[in-house]
Image (cartoon, coloured by chain):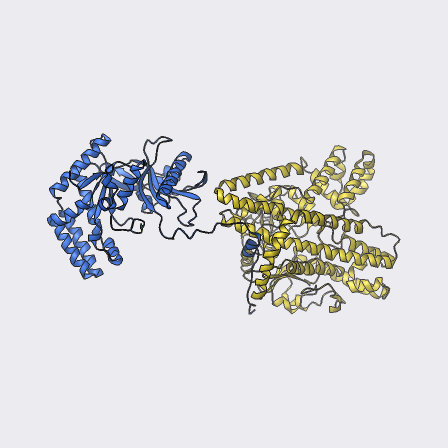
Amino acid sequence: MPFSEAEIIADPGYPGWHSGMAVGPRMHTVARPIGPELKDSFWILEYRWSYGIRPLGFTVVDDAMNWGLQRGAYETHLPGSNGQDYALAGVHAYCRELPQFSALEDEAREQRLDACLPPFLEGFSANWAATTRTLDARGRTLCECDLSGLGTGELLEYLEDARLYLRWVWEVHFQWMYPLLVNYLGFTGFCEELGIAAAEVPKFLAGNPSKITEGDQALFSLAAEARNVGLESVFKENEAGDIVTALGKAGASASGFQDKLEEFLQTWGWRTENVGDLGIDSWRENPTPVFGTIRTLLAKDSIPDVATELQHSAAARDEAIAATRGRLSRSEQVSFDEGLQALQSANFIWWNEDHNHYIDMRSTIPMRRAALALGTVLGCANPDDTTFLFWPELIRLAEGRAKFNEFANLIGERRDYFKQWAARRGEMPKYLGPTPEQVTDPIMIEMDGVTEEFLRAVRFNQSGAEFLTGTPGGAGKIQGRAKVLLTAEGIHALAPGDVLVCEGTSPSWTPAFAKIAACVCDTGGSLSHAAVISREYGVPSVLGTAIATKLIREGDLVEVDGSKGEVRVLERAA
Amino acid sequence: MSDFTFSFDAAEAADPRHSGAKVARLAQLAASGHAVPKGFVVTTAAFSAFIEESPVGREIGEIIRIAESANAEQTLREAATAIAALGETVTLPDAIAAALRHGYEQLCLAERRVDLPVAVRSSATGEDAKDASFAGQYESLLGMRSVDAVAQAVVQCWLSLFNERALLYRQRAGLSFADTPMAVAVMTLVEARAAGVAFSEHPVKRTSDRVVIEGTFGFGEALVQGIVTPDHAELDKADLRILDYQIGEKTQVSILDAALGKVVERPMPDTFRTARVLDDEELQALAQTVRRLEEEAGHAVDVEWVLPVGRQPGQPVAVVQLRPITGKPANEAPSKPTWSPGHYASKYGVRKRAGRSSA
């Protein structure tokens, strides 16, 4: 049985939670259990945190989302929106828009946006390069800092640095994302005025190597190396979690593979499988996800080559641009070229991949390291007990103003609470509160796919229906058996030819696209991760269907038309 | 020689007072070297003579004068019905009949064909030369191939000046039929492989960087009457690149029925319905012609064209009608999209919601 809205409102949240725990930096709102405000607005279940949020994770919800989005909207002078508001039902995050209602303020913002956007775009390349150097340097300093042997005082300082870093990278995230996004949308509208279909625009911006494609290439090379040195059977015959041991037995160090792996992890290992998850280690600390991906890659006849894929998308891009220009008159070409040049140099689609390496995949590693190290020196029963404390509690503990014993029972209760709610993820309502006709936040509309059509689908949610529509992602039409996944953990179990049905994807899902036949998501717009990756991999996809994971069941035979944005259930699983 | 007919070659034919606006423009085009069908004009003088000198003409004149002075819609409608009935009984005054015979025979000789099929088209006067809003009100007949058939067609064109729509239109415009005598063109019927219209600026968007061409198989009547969806093409006016070509569903075709001696509408054969009408060379030849016509006219133009059967690449396309594009004054140039990040971000990148909702 799904949770009822009344049940969610009535739930007081984690044991021991009270408003004094909500200390996060505040623009408009902070993370908290959803109360009666559930009834005021339309809330969407956040797919990125499908595994559930621990008490210390409230800092991530606050810094990354509430602070990041609200600050970003403010700094961008965004008319219409004050960003988004995140709150929790149990351990699951929901978000809603924070509209801006004053027409006077909108007008002032519009003027400021008009003045600030052009210099931002002109400086994009140089400034982003400089920003990534700082992002990388700060991140690496914290990630690589040796915490062994540090006392609580030093660890407390490190923890506070980790928090500042977390908050800062997400400030950067949305202070770049909002202006790049509205500029991209402006260009799309401009193209439509020139008679160019909006669906063409992402093609113009594809095919550029990013930090993500670079990392993929390194991983693919590592897989190829495993095959070359004859370790393929080790990967095929062992589960990902057993591969470290199996590699040792198979003499991987003698063949030089161990060195290659070490080299890979040094460069690319400071990333987590999920965005903003304090519950998991980085690849550097636990490379199981890397082995899982290598396993997946080795199951294929040939390992994809990123450079070749990029060449193909670059050729497709140039072809799309040439075809579009061919349909424009000379004078229209002059305007189009000017806009395209500006868009290519401040390329949102590229940035939207590239930044994940510096921000999304790394932001919580220092905080987890700090929490675990503190857990050890403070004598916690389990090192990750500290992740079951709220921020003010952890600070009190680290400052010596409280003893671990005072929290031992509470932590046990919170672990139970976490486990109960996390297990019922599939029963969480996808949407809460009244469904509006439209929302105003551009990230919510374009990235998460909360379009008017999406909202219509939510309003007329017909379980049992066998046809749904959404935003076209990757083009093409294909049939396959549905594999419904609620978290990225299941991706290594996907078989080639499966149709992936999920709430939404983030970079941790990327390896799946090398083998699936098609992808259908509840959320996501034409700019979402799933849309971009499915275009790069040539996988048909339909995003923002609102209800796919409710409507499609494991094993159903479905037809996905990624060109039209249509999904049909052809045959129900027995 | 009377002044009842003039060959298109004659200087008089280019004078709209003799020839009406349409023929005058065609004569001017012929004079400046465009491929215009050969022909002659039955002048406004012939029309006036018919009204003043023939019994039927005088009767028509009388009905109209009474109706126009009554200035009531009902009276005009009755007049239109009465004149249509009179049309059955018309015999042309001898002098006009002789001039017509002479004109047709000379045209046959010029084309070196005994039973030359011709198009007979009305060419009204008294309209502002740039006002085409009255286009299509008057009769046009195609495929006549004898003196008698031509004479009948000319009478039908004359009488179309008194059809109900025309009478009502002139009443509203405050014009008398005396101000708008009718000339009629008799011209070689260009056997059409394809025909259509073309515009030197976009007829809807009013942008001037493209030539817009619409065409269908056969004669252009079905297209002009709007009973087929033609193929639609757009070319860059600057370099004649083909920017767009949309194939239309052409369900009807206008063809010449030899037995009836006129152009009729038939269902389009299935093989042709969604076949492409115009190849690249034809499109560019048409666009080039339209561009030149606009340059010579000094304003945007709307052209009816025909691709003659047997036309070879490089040969001219036939222009059968030229009109200025009317409606919006030319000085209100449409705004062309010009890239500006702030402007477009505000226009498309954000969504505002003024006023707090009551919910």
Q: Quadrant of residue A301?
A: top right
Residue drawn 56% across and 47% down? A339
Q: Quick one: quadrant of the N terminus of chain A?
A: bottom right
Front residue (pair A431, B52): B52
User: Which percent across, then down, holds residue A346?
Assistant: 62, 48
User: Which percent across, then down, holds residue A485?
Assistant: 65, 50
Chain yellow in the figure, letter: A
User: Which percent across, then down, holds residue A133?
Assistant: 74, 48
Front residue (pair A166, B181): B181
Residue drawn 14% across and 55% down? B62
Front residue (pair A272, B349): B349
A92 relative to A353, above or below: below
The single residue placed furthest to the front in the displayed view is: B11
Look at the image and give the colour of chain B. Answer: blue
A302 relative to A566, above or below: above
Q: Does residue A271 appear in this view?
A: no
Total numbered badges shown on the rendered structure: 0
